[in-house]
Image: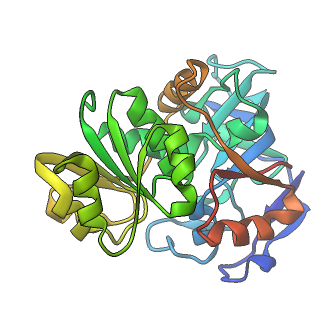
Amino acid sequence: MRAAVYDAYTENFDDITVRELPDPKLPPASVLIEVRAAGVNPVDWALVGGHLDPVMPTQFPVTPGWDVAGVVIGLGFDTPEFSIGDEVVAYARKDVLGGGTFAEKVAVPVHAVAPKPKSLSWEQAGGLPLAGGTALRTLESLGDLEGKTVLIHGASGGVGSFAVQIARAAGARVIGTASEANHEYLRGLGAEPVTYGDGLVERVLEAADGKVDGVADFVGGVLEHTLAVLAEGGAHASVADPSVAEHGGRYIWVRPDGSETARLGLLVDEGKLTVAVAGTYGLDDVPQAFKDSATGHVRGKLVIVP
């Protein structure tokens, strides 16, 4: 099969090349997926530079990618949950960094796999699992959001835009930080936008008419602002700043969980959640996809289509 690979940690995305690799082995309780689309996430290109090496063992050559949408073409021993031909999605992170989803085929443990939402295209489905699961897990850590006011840092990004929609579906009022260029986009998702930068605390307090009940941080470096606008007894969580745990918050690291991904699919098929695709790339274009993602100015999901 064809796959994008790198042979050593590197800061040069052009070191990622496409080559022929053997088809993945299919362990028990796993499915072999023919990849139709695989979302790009910032963690994918951070891993190329070895930034998670202290906590994740690596087996080179590495095929990047943790999101996948595709068709089941093989079943490991004792895998009654799925059948050949099923259309599925998964957050396919494994314990060892190696065989990722930017390939024509990938083997994924069945506990991470969920049915593909019927209302999504392949490209949209490929961009859903990790970013959507991160948003869902972060918001649920804040407790019941019905009737609450929530501040979302980085609301127009890949994770933040999911979080806005999920919070609104849960009955929350959402204030979201973004550049002015993305304010109209946030209004379309149901959020009240505020510009980040100097004066953010004052703008949030004015928009909320007081302090907020919860804060979800998807950018990092904003803990001081979070604590300044959070009401007493409020909850906060971050995917980008582990130090929040020292200040009463929760640091989020999403686990592969097919049941969680299936819940995202239900929100999608109920019309409460959608996936904006900002661009698609072939396997040969993975370096460019990483360069575009690393600019930090992408609105929506970038997706690899083998």
Which of 197 and 142 lies nearest the eye of the viewer? 197
**26 to 51, vertically: above or below:** above
Q: Residue at (34%, 66%) from the top-left corner? A: 241
Which of 107 and 273 lies nearest the eye of the viewer? 273
**Count the marks: how many?**
0
Q: Is residue 206 left or right of residue 218?
A: left
To which quarter of the image does residue 255 belong?
top left
Q: Is residue 83 left or right of residue 45?
A: right
To which quarter of the image does residue 269 belong?
top right
Residue 144 at x, y percent in the picture:
24, 30
Q: Is residue 116 left or right of residue 262?
A: right
Q: Residue at (45%, 43%) from the top-left corner? A: 163
Say whether residue 95 is visible: no
Farthest left residue in view: 232
Farthest bottom residue in view: 11
Residue 237 at x, y percent in the picture:
29, 53
Say whether residue 138 is visible: yes
**220 to 93, vertically: above or below:** below
Which of 199 and 241 lies nearest the eye of the viewer? 199
Residue 157 at x, y percent in the picture:
54, 55
Q: Residue at (13%, 50%) from the top-left corner? A: 231
**258 to 51, vertically: above or below:** above
Which of 97 and 154 lies nearest the eye of the viewer? 154
**60 to 232, vertically: above or below:** below
Chosen colour scheme: rainbow
Residue 93 at x, y percent in the picture:
57, 50
Q: Is residue 132 left or right of residue 214?
A: right
